[in-house]
Every structure is written in C-alpha cells, then in structure tokens.
Amino acid sequence: MRRVQISSPKKLYKLRNAVAGLTSPALRAGK
C-alpha cells in the first residue's frame, strides 16, 4: 500500500510535467 501511495504522486508529477510541456507550445501557438 505504501509503495502505491508513494508512486502515485511521482506518476502525477510526471504527468503534470508532460502536460505542461505539451500545453506550453500549444499556448504559444494559440497566441
């Protein structure tokens, strides 16, 4: 259970970074 709880935030953090990396160029292209 602890491993899952610890890995969850790490996965979310990676997802946030991936989303931010994809959204940054999208926002620039939109502007």
Image (cartoon, helix red, strand yellow):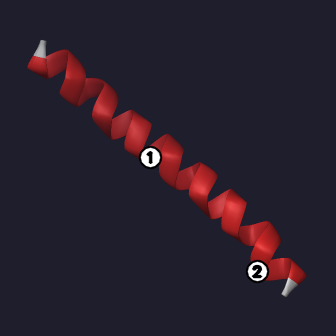
Label 1: which residue?
18
Mark on residue 7? none
Cβ atoms at labels 2 and 1 below 8 Å apart: no
Q: SS of the residue at dot 2?
A: helix
Q: Which corner quadrant holds the C terminus?
A: top left
Task: Name the residue located 78 percent from the left edge and 74 percent from the top edge.
Answer: 5
When the figure is inspected, residue 26 is found, relative to residue 31, above or below; the finding is below
Q: Is residue 11 left or right of residue 7?
A: left
Write down the quadrant of residue 3 in the picture. bottom right
- Decide: few, some or many residues near mark 1? Use Cα within 10 Å; few <14, some 14-19, many ≥20: few
Quadrant hosting residue 19: top left
Please provide percent x and percent y for residue 24: 32, 26
Q: Is residue 10 above or below residue 23?
A: below
Task: Name the residue beneath numbered marker 2.
Answer: 4
Instruction: Answer left or right for 29 relative to 13.
Output: left
Q: What residue type is labelled 2?
A: Val
Dot 1: element = helix
Amino acid at circle 1: Ala
Q: In this view, does 11 lie to the left or right of 31?
A: right
The structure residue drawn at horizontal position 84% and vertical position 87%, both measured from the top left corner, is 1
Query: Residue 7: x, y in percent?
Result: 74, 70
For the point 70% across and 60% down, which residue is it?
A: 9
Residue lying furthest bottom: 1
For the residues labelled 2 and 1, the Cα–Cα distance comes to 21 Å
Question: Farthest left residue?
Answer: 30
